[in-house]
Image (tube, rainbow, N blue to C red):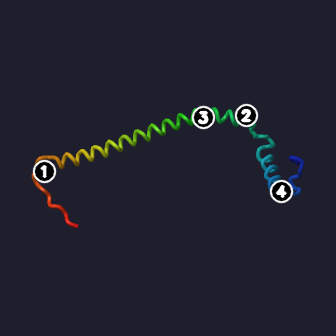
Amino acid sequence: METSGSSIRGSYRSSGEFLYVWADLYFMDVSYHLEIWQIAAICLLMLPLFFIANYVVVKKMVQERKIREERVERFIAAGVAREMNPENRSKKRPKRRF
């Protein structure tokens, strides 16, 4: 059984040749190499998927940020409303001394 011009039992000149022969045996000597135009076509076809995924991720991040900012604003508004309440304003709290 001979592949790529060298014997399986023979010595290999480099590890690269060994890997090439091993890959040929593993893939049943079928070439899976893609040409440049095929790689470019796959990349172009994947580009819309990338843009859709990016849109979804950014939209979700914006929504989460808006919810977080609204929560902070409500917290601050509640604190200001408590301090501006006439009942609480009449009762002066002693200032803390450090």
Distance from the alpha carbon under mark 1 to that under mark 2 = 75 Å
The amino acid type, in three-letter code, at marker 1 is Arg
Q: Nearer the viewer, residue 57 or 72?
A: 72
Q: Of the numbered discs in the image, which one, if any, rests on residue 14?
A: 4
Residue 6: x percent and y percent? 89, 51
Question: Which residue occupies 35% across, 41% down?
Answer: 67
Q: Nearer the viewer, residue 22 or 95?
A: 95
Q: Of the numbered discs in the image, which one, if any, rests on residue 30?
A: none
Which callout, 2 or 3, points at the residue further toward the start of the chain?
Answer: 2
Which type of secondary structure does the marked residue at label 3 adopt?
Answer: helix
List the residue tagged with mark 3: 47
Question: Which residue occupies 80% across, 53% down?
Answer: 16
Which callout, 3 or 1, points at the residue further toward the start of the chain?
Answer: 3
List the residue tagged with mark 2: 37
List the residue tagged with mark 1: 89
The image quadrant that residue 92 belongs to is: bottom left
Residue 34: x percent and y percent? 74, 38
Tell me the mark number nearer the camera, choosing from 2 and 4: 2
In the image, 58: left or right of 42?
Answer: left
Which callout, 4 or 1, points at the residue further toward the start of the chain?
Answer: 4
Distance from the alpha carbon under mark 3 to that under mark 4 = 39 Å
The amino acid type, in three-letter code, at marker 2 is Trp
